Image: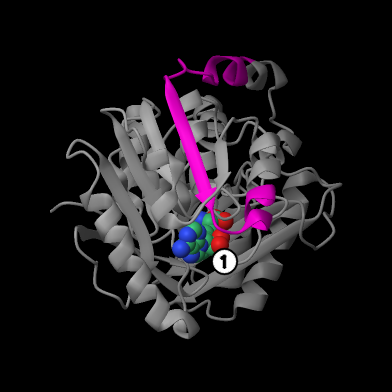
Amino acid sequence: MDLFVSCAPGLEPLLADEIRQLRLGSPTEVAGGVEMSGGLRSIYRANLELGLAQQVRARLGTFLATTGGELGRKTAKLEFERWIDPGRPLRVSVTSRGSRLAHTGQVAERVRRAIAHRVKGTPPPGRGGAHVHVRLVRDRAQLSIDTSGAPLHRRGYRLDPGPAPLREDLARALVVVSGWGRAGRLVDPMVGSGTVAIEAALMASGRPPGGGRSFEFEHAPCFDPALWARTKAAAGRKEERAEVFGSDRDPDALRRAAANAERAGVTLRLDVASLSEAPGVRATPADGALVTNPPWGERLEGDTSRLYRRLGELVAGLPRSWKAAVAMPAERRAPRPFSSVLVTDARGIKIRLCRRGP
Ligand SMILES: C[S@@+](CC[C@H](N)C(=O)[O-])C[C@H]1O[C@@H](n2cnc3c(N)ncnc32)[C@H](O)[C@@H]1O
C-alpha cells in the first residue's frame, strides 16, 4: 500500500530520519510530508510511534478522471469496504487544480455515492469518523483515507495547555534539532505547560508518543486487533538514563506542567525559578541540552530581546559539550550563539527552530 505521512512544513527531513531510525520504511520526502509503502503493521506503527508526524493516509487509488461518471465508476472499484464502516460518519475533502472536475462539492458527492455503493450502506456525513481525501491535479484523481483521526500531535496528555504552548510535534522537533542524545540531562528553563520537557522525557523513556490515545484505523472493518496488540507490545524500547528538568518563574505554569507530565506518565524535575537561576543548569553533568521556547509577541518586544541576551549568556556558560535549541518567531534572526535550522508553521504562525553552534 502507498502511504503518505504528513508533518508540519519544514519538518520533512526530520520525519524521514525518524522513520529510518525506527526502521519503519524507506521514506521519500515530498512537500508537507513523506511517501512510503507499507501494510497494516506499518500504518499501526507509524500512527503509534512517529512523534513528528501529523497524519498517516493510505492511498487507495490514483486514476484519470475527466467526467463525474468516470470518477464515480473508478472510485467504486477501490476497496473502501476495508476502511469504512457504513455506520460511522464520513467526511470527503476535495482539492482540485488544473482539472476539468473543478467543482469540489460535486466531486465530493460523486465520491460519496460511489463509496456508499461499495460499502453497501450510506455513512452519514460529518466529522469524527472516516475521512476521505480526493486530490485532483490535471485530471488525475488521487483518493486516500486518513488512518489517524485526530492529528497525531494530540497525544492526549496536554489537557491544560496554558498560554502560548508549543505544539507537541514542534516541541519534539526542537529537541531533535538540539542534537540531544536522549541520555544525560535536558533542561527547559521556561517550561510553561511542559511540552518540550514532556516530549524529551517520552523520547528518553522509549514510550511511543501515541501510546495514550486512539486512532481512526481501530474503527476500520479491516482492523486487526491481534496485530495491533502485538504492535503496541513491541513499541516500548530501551529506557535511556536521562533526567529532565523544567523551571519557570510562574508557579501556575509549573502546576500545569506537573499535571500534564503525570498524564503523560513521565517524571520531570520541576522548580519555580527565573531563567538565570534555573536549577537544571547548576552542577551540570557532561552530557546535556538546554531546549526552550521563550515567550514571544509584539507586546514583549523589548523584554524579549533582553531575554534572548540572557539566554545566550546562560548557554555560553554551559560546557561546550552541551547542546542547546530555541524556538522563536521566524521574523527574528537567530540570537548568538544560535543558528537557524528550519522554519515551520503552526496555524499560520511561522516559527524558527535554532540550535547552538553553526
Ligand atoms: C511560551 S511559554 C512556554 C510554553 C511551553 N513551551 C509550553 O509548551 O507550554 C514561555 C514561558 O516562559 C516563562 N518565562 C518568561 N520569562 C521568564 C524568566 N525570565 N524566567 C523564567 N521563566 C520565564 C513564562 O512564565 C512562560 O511560562
Work out whether residue 130 can be spotted.
yes
Q: Residue at x 29, y 47 (%)?
A: 324
Span colored in magenta: 230-256
Q: Is residue 251 magenta?
A: yes
- Give how far across and how far down residue 108 sits, in percent: 66, 68
**Color scheme of the displayed model:** one colour
Please name the amino acid that badge 1 sits on: Ala
Which one is nearer the viewer's eye here, 16 or 185?
185
Q: Which residue is mark 1?
A: 164
Figure quadrant of residue 72: bottom right
- Dot 1 surroundings within 10 Å: few (below 14), some, or many (20 or more)? few
Residue placed most toward the observer, 14 or 30: 14
Q: Name the residue located 24 percent from the left edge and 73 percent from the top edge.
A: 333
Residue 19 placement (x, y as % from top left): 37, 35
Q: Residue 273 at what x, y percent from top left?
A: 52, 51
Q: Nearer the viewer, residue 291 or 47?
A: 291
Camera-side residue of 237 and 112: 237
